[in-house]
Amino acid sequence: MNTKEAWNRWDEGRWERLGESMTPIDYGVLHMKFPAAAIKNARDYGYAKRDEAQNDAPTTEEFVTFAEAAGLDRVTFETYVVSPHREDRRITVEGILIKDATPAERNWIYRNNPDELDEFGGFIRAWWD
């Protein structure tokens, strides 16, 4: 199933097989984790706008560019997802999780001033409010 199919199969607040539900916020709105490749596809289909950013976070385009340089399989995004059943439907990246970050990758994360920054078990998690 690709991102476009998943977007069209919204079911009881979860995206089948593409994302892991984290925290329901309100009807049709979820915090979800997605592999970077899924957000790249969502961007390509227009569901995640290239210039969209959560407050002071990097834009979707900046996040995807980072993930492509790092290797899409090494990066997971934390997102804010608004159901396609709502007029304001969208996917907004608000956090990143990367394993075994290189010095350059760490520098990119630190330079973008995340609101939360955690390091554990070889992973870095950064989140922007």
Image: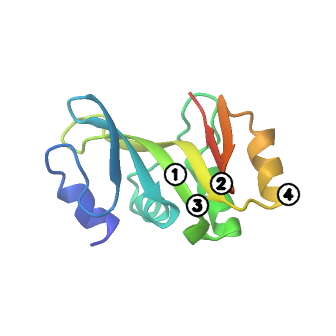
Which is closer to the viewer, label 3 or label 2? Answer: 2
State the residue at coordinates (63%, 62%).
67
The image quarter in which residue 66 lies: bottom right
Q: Are marks 3 and 2 in contact (CB under 8 Å)?
A: no
Circle nearer the N terminus (3, 2): 3
Residue 37, above or below 95: below
Task: Give percent across and percent down for residue 57.
Answer: 63, 36
Relative height, residue 76 to residue 41 (above, below): above
Q: Which residue is mark 1?
A: 77
Q: Name the amino acid type tagged 4.
A: Pro
Inspect the image, locate mark 1, and give the three-letter code of the amino acid beneath it: Phe
Residue 17 in percent (x, y) is at: 28, 64
Question: In the image, what residue type sits under mark 2?
Answer: Gly
Query: Mark 1 against mark 2, which lies toward the viewer?
Result: 2
Mark 4 or 2, which is nearer the eye?
2
Observer able to see residue 51: no
Report helix, strand or loop for mark 1.
strand
Distance (Cα) linking label 1 and label 3: 7 Å
* Image point (45%, 43%), residue name: 79
Task: Tell me the quarter of the image containing the C terminus.
Answer: top right
Proximity of marks 1 and 3: CB atoms separated by less than 8 Å: yes
Element class at badge 4: helix
Mark 1–mark 4 Cα distance, whole angstroms, equals 20 Å
Which residue does the numbered mark 3 point to in the structure image? 75
Q: Residue at x 24, y 45 (%)?
A: 84
Alpha-carbon neighbours of circle 1 within 10 Å: few (<14), some, or many (≥20)?
many
- Residue 115 screen position, x and y as percent: 65, 28
Q: Residues within 10 Å of mark 3 (few under 14, many from 20)?
A: many
Q: Do the numbered discs 4 and 3 sit on residues whose CB atoms are within 8 Å?
A: no
- Nearest the eye: 116 or 129: 116
